[in-house]
Amino acid sequence: MRLILLGPPGAGKGTQASAIVKRYDIPHISTGDIFRENIKKGTELGLKAKSYMDKGLLVPDDLVISIVKNRLLEDDCKKGFLLDGFPRTLSQGEALDEVLKDMGLELTRVINIDVEKEVLIERAIGRRVCKECGATYHIKFSPPKEEDVCDKCGGRLFQRDDDTKETIEKRIQVYTEQTKPLIDYYTKKGLILNIDGSKSIESIFQDIVDSLEA
Ligand code: ADP
Ligand code: AMP
């Protein structure tokens, strides 16, 4: 399976990604996670990316594309992959087509998770992430057993710097202007699977699996 997860910020891409990669035994490639990892380590890439992320803006295409290109060349991607949060612009989509063409590969499906704006804001504001393993929780919809402690590894949970109401609204605007056109792009290629993201985490996963295996 060579999959893309498309959708606005807070739609539940990362949440579904964890379950999808487990089921199909493929690597999870989240460009947002790659940037956050670099910020944590204090790399030059992390420093550059942070200045855009904190404002709710996209990191420039050239930076993102070269990272994904190198990642796709790694050995574990031979069995497939799930791209989460990439591509986010038409240029990134076209660059991905080129990379895959050079590798002699094609995409299997593009899973588009759609959720209305008010729900996105509520989901993103209540999101908590484990500092150690990156597991995602929600204070109301998917709370950990013990407040601020990860069920999986015992790590502390934190709130992302870009999960403030103001930055989320900016990110949704950026999504509408720069990322949404990709829905059309992949619909024309016959690759889109539209998934209603307003349901429960479990129902959405079931819908995704049913559609992929239909
Ligand atoms: P994205 O990767 O698209 O930004 P996440 O997967 O991080 O989104 O989900 C955003 C927040 O919403 C997280 O706190 C997550 O626990 C919560 N969430 C995800 N899917 C659902 C759902 N179907 N119903 C309620 N909350 C959800
Ligand atoms: P995410 O974890 O997917 O919500 O991404 C968090 C932030 O990382 C975004 O708001 C962007 O600033 C940056 N980012 C992640 N993926 C990309 C991408 N494909 N292109 C540009 N910026 C990205």
Image (tube, helix red, strand yellow):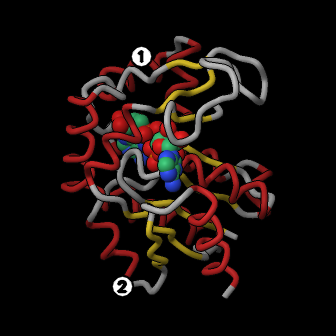
Q: Residue at x 33, y 67 (%)?
A: 182
Which quadrant does the C terminus fall into?
Answer: bottom right
Question: Residue 176 appears in which quarter of the rendering?
Answer: bottom left
Residue 137 percent coordinates (x, y)? 58, 34
Can residue 64 be seen from the camera position used here? no
Residue 15 percent coordinates (x, y)? 58, 48
Q: Residue at x 52, y 35 (%)?
A: 138
Find numbered disc 2 in the image and state the secondary structure of the residue it sits on: helix
Q: Local crowd at mark 1 within 10 Å, few (<14), some, or many (≥20)? A: some
Q: Residue at x 69, y 59 (%)?
A: 20
Q: Is residue 214 above or below residue 6?
A: below
Find numbered disc 1 in the image and state the secondary structure of the residue it sits on: helix
In this rendering, position of residue 56 left or right of residue 206 = left
Residue 37 percent coordinates (x, y)? 58, 24
Residue 191 or residue 73, whichever sits in front: 191
In this rendering, position of residue 132 left or right of residue 102 = right
Which quadrant does the N terminus fall into?
Answer: bottom right
Q: Local crowd at mark 2 within 10 Å, few (<14), some, or many (≥20)? A: few
- Mark 1: which amino acid? Leu
Q: What residue is disc 1 on?
A: 47
Residues under labels 2 and 1: Cα distance? 37 Å
Question: Residue 56 appears in which quarter of the rendering?
Answer: top left
Q: Earlier in the sequence, mark 2 or mark 1?
A: 1
Q: Residue at x 35, y 53 (%)?
A: 8
- Mark 2: which amino acid? Lys
Q: Which dot marks residue 188?
A: 2
Residue 71 percent coordinates (x, y)? 63, 45
